[in-house]
Each structure stands twice: as structure tokens, then as C-alpha cells.
Image (cartoon, grey):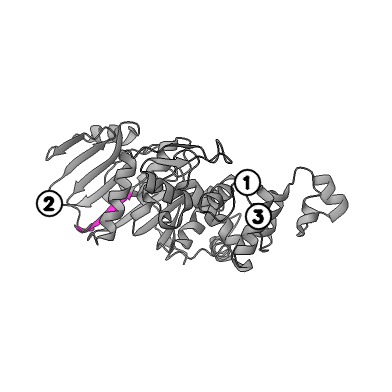
Amino acid sequence: MSESLLVHYGGEVPQDRDELMKLAGVGRKTANVVASVAFDLPAIAVDTHVERVSKRLGICRWKDSVLEVEKTLMVKLPEDRWSQAHHQLIFFGRYFCKARNPQCESCPLLDICREGKKTRAGGTTMMTAELHKLDELKQSLPFGEQESWRLQQLENKLKGEDVFSVAICGHFSAGKSTLINQLLGANLLPSSPVPTTANIMTIQGGEETAIRAIKNNGQEEQFQGHIPWEKLQQLALDGDGVKEIVLTLPLPFLKRKVTLADTPGMDSTDPTHGRYTANQLLTTDAIIYVTDYNHVRSQTNLQFLKQLQRENKPFVIVVNQIDKHNDDELSFSIFKHGLLDMLQRYGIKPVKVFTTSARAKKTTRTTS
């Protein structure tokens, strides 16, 4: 591919989709992604998520090929929405309309979903297109504890629950727990160079220190007054047994109607970590997104932040481990302007961007 780019295109990646598809290993989907993301051209790349969501919602027919799905979406969607719709369908398919265990009961599009209506009418059945797309084979969809919990969270929010929730999220080992420990003034949460937090840790203000561990089997473990802090860290690492920990502390900066949640790394290889984080972000009111200095420009971060932007959730970005920056190689001013320019090009508009280093305990700087 590199040789072809040099010989036939003068070292420049072509913008035209047909020209892109002449390159070795580049198919229609990849060409559409490059045209959309790299050159900001209207295009819809159809991957497994886009195809699945389009068919389940009834936008396309079950027998449609990938190309037919793309053409149908191009007809039914305004051209200026093609690129955005591509990412929206991907994220929706990733976190709600999953292939094996779709989150129908907490899906915001249930009322307009073709297969969702069948599920609701039939009680416990839904079609699995991945197994038998043409035969519309139906299988049992269990309404388990996770789904019940998610539904209850949404109901509480819709009823006007008087709590403002802030979630701290980001990729693993970005320093989320370390940042919270700095805010708390003590190393209460487990932190290390490897992924640590395995469940949701919700911190709330209160007159007396207490811990409540909500386990996956429905049982709870509580401590009050004299707190075994080593036990707290053990619970925070037990993602298989514990789904949420509520830590109550007499903190002056944390009002009673405000909660602060630590979440597992959004890109952890453990699938339960991503599920816990997605559940938390479902109803959170504001987000503190933490990324380390070396990964601030990663596509994982940018795509996640773009999704937050589309959902209109207020968020701030914290670039941690800024002590890795070398002013002799690149001035902080140039780094700052480059970061803000990149965010602007991707349509990402955080409330603020901060740089900090918990390890070096440097003064935090605001970049926007």
C-alpha cells in the first residue's frame, strides 16, 4: 500500500472513495471511514453495528446486503448527517443494541423499534438477526438484575431524583483513582500502573463515614463508624462479586445532594468493566474525563469524547501525567494550542481542559 501511495498518488492519501478502494486491503467500508473522518466528506460506513441497528429499527430490510443498507441510509438520512449518523449507530449498537444481549428494557428507542415492539408484545422474545436473519428466529431475552437496575436508575432520574451525579471516567491507568485520592486527601481507592477499579465507586457526603457494598447476587455488605480501609480496596477490585460501592464521607466540598463516581477503564479488556461504566454514564449529570499525557490524541479518547458531545453531557477533560511533557522539545504553549485545535476540529467542546500530575503534585494548569 505504501508503495502504491508513493508511485500513484505522490505520497498523498486520495480523497476519492473509488481511488481509495484501489489500494491493497481497502474495501468500501474502510474507504468510507477515511473519506468521512480524514477528509470530512459525507459518507456512511456500514459495519456490523450499523447493519444490525438499521435492520432492528426497521430502517432496512433483513435481507438487505451491506451495500443496500448503505444506499438505504443515504436515501433516508440528510447528506449533512451521514458521517455523524455513522458514529451514532456504532455507539448505539455497542452500548445498547448489542448483538447477543441487547439492552431493550433501557433502550431510549424502544417505542419506535420494530424488534423492540415484538419483544414488548411477546414479553420475553426477540429476534436474533446474527443467527437467522431471514428466518427471524426468536430467543428468550432474560430480564435480569442488571437490566432491572438500569431501568430503576432511569426511572429515578425521570422522577426528578434530587441528586447531581458526577462521574470520573477515562481509559485504564489514566489516573482516575489517583485523582480522586488527591481530592479526598487520602489513598482510599486502589491505584497502580495497571487497571484497578473493577466496579462503580460512588462517593457521597454525609455526617458519618460508612461503606455499602452492593453485590451481584443481590446481597449487601455494610460498615459504619470504624471502617476497614483494606477491605474497601479489596471490594473495589472485585468486579465479579461487587457491582457498586457507596462510600459516605464527611467531606466539606461534597454536598449531600452531589455524588462523585469512580468508574473502571472504558477500554478495559474485561467486558464487565465496560458494562459498569456504560451503566453509570447512562444517568450521570456531568463527567470528568481523565486521560494521560501520552494518549490524549488517541482515537479511543476522541471517539468517546465525540459521543459525549453528541449526548450534550457537560464534561471537563483532565490531561494527567503532564510531568511527562518536556518543554525543551515542545513548549507547553504549543502543546496547549495544538490540543485545543484538535478538539475543535473534532467538534469536541469541553467546559474546561486541565493538565495535572498527581505524582509530581504540580500546580494544575487550565488550558481553556
Q: Position of residue 107 (x, y in %)?
A: 40, 52
Residue of label 1: 63
User: Vertical placement of 157 versus 217: above or below?
Assistant: below
Q: Are marks 3 and 1 in contact (CB under 8 Å)?
A: no
Query: Residue 10: which quarter of the image?
Result: bottom right
State which region is magenta.
252-261
**Pointer 2 residue:** 207
Q: Please state which of residues 258 and 250 is positioned toward the viewer in this rendering.
A: 258
Badge 2 density bin: few <14, some 14–19, many ≥20, Cα 10 Å: few
Residue 134 position by quadrant: top right
Q: Nearer the viewer, mark 2 or mark 1?
A: 1
240 relative to 246, above or below = above
**The label number, if any, that marks residue 17 in the structure image:** none
Crowding at mark 1 (Cα within 10 Å: few <14, some 14-19, many 20+): few
- In-image side of 141 versus 300 (left or right): left
Instruction: Report the Cα–Cα distance between label 3 and label 2.
Output: 57 Å
